[in-house]
């Protein structure tokens, strides 16, 4: 199969592919998604095959308006409604009890479905034009960093999907935040582009699902975002971290290893995945960033991608 590279003007063409059960990768404000008709089990099965995605990892369903949520769920919790009104369209994915309309393959057999309304105009136009909810995980090969440019999608999936819509670089560069408001204290299942500080202003205190929590997103148990290079993450106070980086670099270079230290800019949400994706063999060293706002999600991803974490 030859993967067509489409532009914004080709949205009708892309919508036609979705309607006939094909796969289209499209930009969102977070990362590129690999979309299929969420109501068509056969089409969704193609996503798992193209990505090499484990069958027990459910997908997010994308809508273009709040009304489109109604047929997909059994009831909307009050706090979910507050969040939708405040943050949609935008990078927040919400867990709902699922209706029969959503095929089991989308939710990996769970009785919940995670839904979001992206703010990217190409994404929303594609959903509206196809007249269907679109199931879409990130458009990367499973285990690789999520794509933030159409060229990253092509690196991983060229020849395995029908089309990709070129939409430039993703504004945020990190996936959406996933939240379940049905627990007594709302639970963040995945840290992401929407900072929890913002969410807490609307619904009060939230908690972050721990490593062992059953409530975690099934996808979070897999190793993710792993670069080709060995990634060493160094956590601690700025002065100690800087000193350790100097000594580590010296030691590794004396053994003949190529060492690159990621800069503050490179660790920003918009550039992190591209840096991890294109890191050549050798050693990549990442100093920690402050765990506030989007920095929390950056640290979460670095810890998942790292082959070694040094805590000072
Ligand atoms: O920003 C994003 O969310 C991007 C764009 C394309 O929208 N999508 C994305 O999808 O990151 P994916 O499949 O790479 O990550 C979805 C996450 C996974 O960790 C998955 O386990 C979790 O959401 N998830 C999906 N449905 C769930 C459910 N019913 N219950 C708990 N977690 C769920
Ligand atoms: Mg993903």
Image (cartoon, grey):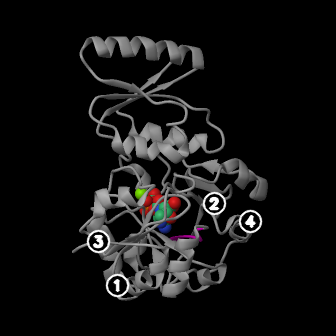
> Which region is colored magenta?
113-118
Task: State how far apart marks 1 and 3 are (Cα).
Answer: 15 Å
In the picture of the structure, the residue carrying the numbered disc 3 is 3
- Residue 218 visible? The answer is no
Assess disc 4: are there few (<14), some (14-19) or many (≥20) residues with their C-alpha within 10 Å of its C-alpha.
few
The disc, 3 or 4, on the residue closer to the chain's N-terminal end is 3
Element carrying mark 4 = helix
Task: State how far apart marks 2 and 3 are (Cα).
Answer: 42 Å
The percent coordinates of residue 155 (x first, y second) are 30, 56
In the picture of the structure, the residue carrying the numbered disc 2 is 183
**Of circles 4 and 2, which is in front?**
4
* Membership of 115 in magenta stretch: yes
Placement of 158 over or under 143, stated as above or below: below
Quadrant in which the N terminus appears? bottom left
Residues at circles 2 and 3 in contact by the CB criterion of under 8 Å: no
The reply, left or right, for residue 71 in relation to residue 196 is left
In the picture of the structure, the residue carrying the numbered disc 1 is 21
Quarter of the figure with residue 121: bottom right
Task: State how far apart marks 4 and 2 are (Cα).
Answer: 20 Å
The percent coordinates of residue 200 (x first, y second) are 74, 52
């Amino acid at each position: 199969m030859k993967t067509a590279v489409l532009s914004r003007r080709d949205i009708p063409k892309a919508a036609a592919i979705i309607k006939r059960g094909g796969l289209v990768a499209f930009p969102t404000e977070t990362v590129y998604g690999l979309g299929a008709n969420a109501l068509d089990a056969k089409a969704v099965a193609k996503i798992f095959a193209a990505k090499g995605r484990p069958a027990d990892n459910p997908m997010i369903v994308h809508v273009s308006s709040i009304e489109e949520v109604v047929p997909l769920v059994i009831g909307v919790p009050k706090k979910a409604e507050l969040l939708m009104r405040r943050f949609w369209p935008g990078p927040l994915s919400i867990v709902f009890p699922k209706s029969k309309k959503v095929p089991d393959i989308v939710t990996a057999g769970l009785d919940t479905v995670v839904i979001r309304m992206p703010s990217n105009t190409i994404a929303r136009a594609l959903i509206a034009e196809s007249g269907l909810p679109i199931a879409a995980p990130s458009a990367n090969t499973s285990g690789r960093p999520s794509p933030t440019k159409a060229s990253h999608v092509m690196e991983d999936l060229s020849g395995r999907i029908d089309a990709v819509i070129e939409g430039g670089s993703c504004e945020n560069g990190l996936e959406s935040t996933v939240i379940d408001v049905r627990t007594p204290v709302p639970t963040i299942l995945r840290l992401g582009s929407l900072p929890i500080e913002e969410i807490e202003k609307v619904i009060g205190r939230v908690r972050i699902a721990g490593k062992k929590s059953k409530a975690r997103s099934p996808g979070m148990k897999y190793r993710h975002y792993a670069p080709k290079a060995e990634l060493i993450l160094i956590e601690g106070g700025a002065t100690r971290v800087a000193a350790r980086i100097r000594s580590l670099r010296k030691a590794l270079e004396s053994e003949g290893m190529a060492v690159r230290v990621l800069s503050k800019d490179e660790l920003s949400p918009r550039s992190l995945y591209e840096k991890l994706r294109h890191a050549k063999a050798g050693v990549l060293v990442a100093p920690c960033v402050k765990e506030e706002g989007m920095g929390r999600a950056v640290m979460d991803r670095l810890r998942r991608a790292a082959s070694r974490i040094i805590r000072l």
